[in-house]
Image: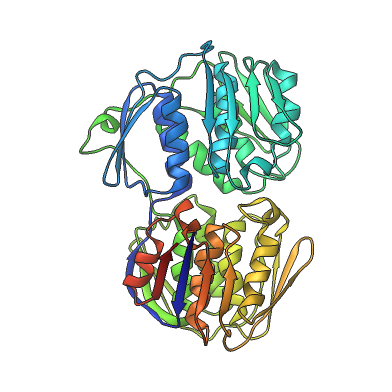
């Protein structure tokens, strides 16, 4: 357990955005599927990265880290239809779980998937209904994890609804690219979080995999091979993981409410949907400038606004903090999917704001925050959710009294160096391990 005690301060200076989790997950998986040697640069150490790396290692890849660089030697990666039984612990990483399940099904492996925290309860309905129709047996005990799959994915048309998560689509695109025959993935509902699938197809294309997208479907040619290009095999070149807009958002919001800072290492043309934080902060009235893969923001007079978070649910906790210190009312729509994150973020975000003296409420698909000049501070339950920890730290910048966050080490799920970077900008966070 750990407690963070954070005093009021202003964030000033420059900080480099950590590497994108979304991109790094996908590059690691593509590297393993290439069954060759590949170097990937700029991978931030986090529990989610350890989850994906651990699963790939269990399946035979040899992965070594030197600083922020990773070497994936997948020449002994598991062969298709291996008779061995594998157990993959996905820890608390939803991406790892939802992507590795269909990959293992396509390879025809016998695998038991386990997880930690809230992961065992996160929805897998689409796979549980789809796989038995395509030769894969699913065994589970009434909840979702542990889940055991056995059999080899077959067929040429796969139909799913991606309402809950775009990770279903990402997982199946990886899986169907491994089949010997051509296949089509049909979506029976609108794709929520389409930018994450765009990241998937972009990374896959770097490894020679071609996906053709139509309005509501994807065509995947069979017998494609993942290719580690010569430059990926060069330790001095390799692939580079771009900066993470989701994590940068915490500092950008901190600058807008009480600071003057820049966040570097951001691809202004990124597929990442959370770069929308720039537009959101502008809607609040923030003084924000983009230049040379950096974003500059300073303390601004902020006003409440209406926001659609359907495609950017990970931004909601910290955007709610910005709303709490903006004059007027902010309505954040499209928040229903927040129930299925590391915590029920509809509840945990609302409780965070209220526990710090703010005004917040929610219905099934809308969160409403009434802004005020400052927050009083107080104790926050992180609900073991990394984004609640980081958002609460941003809230401390406008809190009259200390903000005390319980189980602050939950931040290691995605951003192990968050408090170091926070303090380097002038933040006053003291993390006590117990």
Left or right: residue 65 versus residue 227 is left
Name the residue rendered at 44%, 24% in the picture: 33
Name the residue rendered at 38%, 56% in the picture: 18
**Viewer-nearest residue: 120 or 128:** 120
* Residue found at the far front of this picture: 434
Q: Is residue 252 visible?
A: yes
Across and down, in percent, residue 430 comes to 40, 72
**Viewer-nearest residue: 336 or 375:** 375
Q: Is residue 287 visible?
A: no
Across and down, in percent, residue 384 comes to 57, 57
Across and down, in percent, residue 122 comes to 67, 43
* Residue found at the far right of this picture: 363
Across and down, in percent, residue 30 comes to 43, 30
Left or right: residue 197 versus residue 63 is right
Name the residue rendered at 44%, 26% in the picture: 58
Left or right: residue 262 versus residue 374 is left
Above-or-below relation of 147 to 95: above
**Viewer-nearest residue: 374 or 7:** 7
Q: Quadrant of the C terminus?
A: bottom left
Above-or-below relation of 99 to 348: above
Name the residue rendered at 51%, 85% in the picture: 401
Q: Quadrant of residue 40?
A: top left
Left or right: residue 16 versus residue 322 is left
């Amino acid at each position: 357990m750990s407690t963070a005690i954070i005093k009021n301060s202003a964030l000033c200076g420059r900080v480099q955005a950590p590497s994108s989790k979304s991109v790094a997950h996908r590059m690691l998986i593509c590297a393993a599927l290439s069954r060759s040697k590949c170097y990937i640069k700029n991978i931030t150490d986090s529990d989610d990265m350890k989850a994906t790396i651990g699963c790939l290692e269990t399946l035979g890849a040899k992965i070594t880290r030197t600083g922020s660089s990773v070497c994936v030697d997948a020449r002994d990666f598991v062969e298709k239809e291996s008779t061995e039984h594998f157990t993959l612990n996905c820890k608390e990483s939803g991406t790892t779980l939802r992507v590795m399940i269909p990959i293992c099904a396509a390879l025809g492996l016998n695998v038991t998937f386990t997880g930690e925290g809230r992961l065992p309860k996160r929805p897998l309905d689409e796979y549980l209904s789809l796989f038995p129709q395509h030769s894969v047996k699913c065994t589970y005990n009434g909840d979702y994890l542990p889940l055991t799959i056995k059999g080899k994915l077959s067929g040429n048309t796969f139909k799913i609804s991606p309402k809950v998560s775009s990770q279903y689509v990402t997982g199946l695109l990886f899986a169907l690219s491994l089949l010997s025959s051509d296949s089509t993935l049909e979506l029976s509902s609108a794709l929520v979080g389409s930018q994450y699938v765009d990241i998937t197809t972009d990374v896959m294309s770097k490894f020679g995999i071609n996906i053709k997208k139509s309005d509501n479907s994807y065509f995947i040619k069979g017998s494609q091979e993942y290719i580690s290009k010569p430059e990926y095999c060069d330790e001095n070149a390799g692939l580079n993981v771009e900066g993470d807009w989701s994590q940068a958002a915490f500092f950008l919001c901190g600058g807008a409410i009480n600071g003057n800072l820049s966040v570097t290492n951001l691809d202004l043309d990124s597929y990442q949907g959370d770069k929308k934080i720039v537009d959101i902060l502008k809607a609040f009235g923030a003084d924000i400038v983009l230049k040379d893969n950096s974003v500059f923001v300073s303390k601004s007079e902020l006003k409440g606004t209406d926001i659609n978070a359907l495609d950017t649910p990970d931004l909601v906790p910290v955007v709610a903090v910005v709303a709490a210190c903006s004059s007027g009312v902010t309505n954040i729509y499209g928040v229903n999917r927040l129930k299925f994150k590391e915590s029920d973020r509809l509840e945990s975000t609302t409780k965070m704001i209220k526990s710090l003296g703010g005004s917040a409420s929610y219905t099934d698909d809308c969160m409403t925050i009434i802004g005020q000049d400052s927050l009083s501070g107080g104790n926050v339950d992180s609900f073991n959710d990394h984004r609640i920890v980081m958002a609460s730290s941003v809230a401390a910048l406008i809190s009259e009294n200390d903000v005390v966050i319980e189980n602050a080490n939950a931040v290691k799920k995605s951003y192990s160096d968050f408090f170091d970077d926070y303090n380097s900008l002038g933040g006053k966070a003291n993390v006590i391990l117990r």
